[in-house]
Amino acid sequence: MKSAGTVELLCDSVRWIEEVPRVALLVYASMPGYFDVLFAGTNGTLLELSTWIQRPGSVFSHERVRVVRQEAIVVGVTVELPHHELTPRQRDDSSWLLQHSNAAQRRNLATNAELLRAVAPPPCDGAYYLRCLAVDENRRGLGLGHQLMSACVSNAIKGGFNSLHLDVRADNAAALALYRHHGFAQVAETLVPAA
């Protein structure tokens, strides 16, 4: 493993909020198909996601984003939250989407509702949920994913949670290896319908 150099893990969004576009790019890269369906593949997908990161009630809100910076550049992110926050935040996101979308976008959401639910199944009661973990593709292999994962596990333990749930694509070998290294085991498999 190469050296990561000077790395800073930030939980306080005040220290990285000016880097929302970069954070949005990393979050988007972790699940582009999901966001393309969610935002109807518009050219403004990253702008929409940036808005969600700045919006307090969103699943992807800055309140729930942790970043890692290397040489003053955001190079990795997690989005993590307790299970009891997930459903209300998903409702808030759905409401926001309906209020800020046109008729064609709303039809797209209705058509793809099953797909969106399959991509983000709800975690078990009492679980801490890792919604997203992403590291800049040019910074992989430096241990940044391990650092983010260790911080997430620590946050779950500090919060009094005895389980941590996450979703990962079956073809994401690097992520699967990272999660197995941190003691995760597969408990369910969801078949995602075609878009």
Image: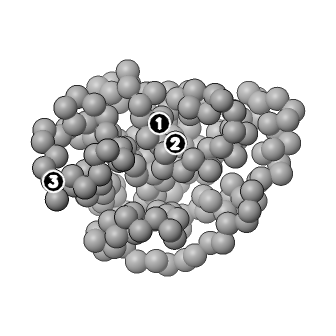
Residue tagged by mark 1? 25
Residue tagged by mark 2? 28
Q: Amino acid at mark 3?
A: Lys
**Quarter where residue 10 is shown:** top left
Q: Residue furthest front?
A: 138
Q: Are marks 1 and 2 in contact (CB under 8 Å)?
A: yes
Q: Residues within 10 Å of mark 1 (few under 14, many from 20)?
A: some
Query: Residue at 21% of width from left, 52% of height from top?
Result: 142
Q: Is residue 5 left or right of residue 21?
A: left
Q: Is residue 42 left or right of residue 84?
A: right
Residue 83 image point, x, y percent: 51, 57
Q: Residues within 10 Å of mark 2 (few under 14, many from 20)?
A: many
Residue 147 visible in the displayed image: no
Q: Amino acid at mark 1?
A: Leu
Label 1 to label 2: alpha-carbon separation: 5 Å
Label 3 to label 2: alpha-carbon separation: 26 Å
Residue 163 image point, x, y percent: 39, 68
Q: Give 85 or 80, whichever is nearer the viewer.
A: 80
> Relative to residue 112, is residue 62 depicted above or below?
above
Query: Residue at 62% of width from left, 59% of height from top?
Result: 119
Residue 91 image point, x, y percent: 67, 44
Query: Residue at 74% of width from left, 27% of height from top?
Result: 100
Q: Amino acid at mark 2?
A: Tyr
**Quarter where residue 44 is shown:** top right
Q: Secondary structure at mark 3?
A: loop
| Numbered circle sitting on residue 2 | 3
Q: Residue furthest top?
A: 18
Residue 161 image point, x, y percent: 37, 63
Query: Residue at 25% of width from left, 50% of height from top?
Result: 144
Q: Residues within 10 Å of mark 3 (few under 14, many from 20)?
A: few
Q: Secondary structure at mark 2?
A: helix
Q: Is residue 49 left or right of residue 39?
A: left
